[in-house]
Image (cartoon, rainbow, N blue to C red):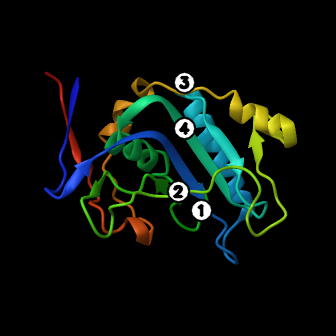
Amino acid sequence: TTARVVLAPDVVPCLSRWLAVDIDQHGPGSSCEANLEAGIALHDVLIDRGFKPLLTDSNGAGGFHLRVFFDEPVITAHVRQLGRWLIRDWKAMGLDRAAEVFPKQDGITLSGKGSCGNWIRLPGRHPKRDHWSRVWDGDDWLEGDDAVNAIVDLGGDSARLIPNEALSFACTHALPRTQRREERLPLHTLNTN
């Protein structure tokens, strides 16, 4: 199986070493419990597929970051497609909106808006709250040195674990505003030559 990435002429195809899903606590109307349940459910989906994901509580107030690290650079469109596929059932999970997927686009433009890539805060001390990230180990939350060791000991996953159903997933739900300018359909095609 080979993949072809199709981007606009002024967009540079990119490679990524990580995926992040940001499940934010959006205030009133947003459920901390639904966020937690969604984070753990997505973590478990990845575990069942052979990944070694990292789930952290991002702010101590109902926000969570789910990350996958790859053992080598992966076509960014494929990484992003995995994230979009993961969050496809966000309404059924009880979330008030779709979680953000990082990277947010399949490539970067040569200049101007979209030429920098995306940022997501690393695990650690929250910049505005007295909170240190905790790490989900599949059964319980790790804190302090145990959390740090879990992060440091985490290895990368093979891109071969990305399921074909994720690569061919056509995103049809309303995306967060930061993602709406992107195409709703996958920007790559699969050839089975």
Q: Earlier in the sequence, mark 4 or mark 3?
A: 3
Question: Exactly how many numbered labels are in the figure?
Answer: 4
Image coords of residue 35 (percent x, y): 67, 57
Q: Which picture quadrant has residue 24?
A: bottom right
Q: Which picture quadrant has residue 53?
A: top right
Identify whether 72 is placed above or below 84: above
Residue at mark 2: 90
Q: Residue at x 49, y 44 (%)?
A: 19
Image coords of residue 43 (percent x, y): 62, 39
Q: Nearer the viewer, mark 2 or mark 4?
A: 4
Q: Residue at x 69, y 27 (%)?
A: 153
Say which amino acid is labelled 3: Gly
Q: Residues within 10 Å of mark 3 (few under 14, many from 20)?
A: few
In-image side of 26 versus 136 (left or right): left
Residue at mark 1: 95
Q: Residues within 10 Å of mark 4 (few under 14, many from 20)?
A: many
Q: Residue at x 39, y 47 (%)?
A: 80
Q: CA distance from mark 2 to mark 4?
A: 19 Å
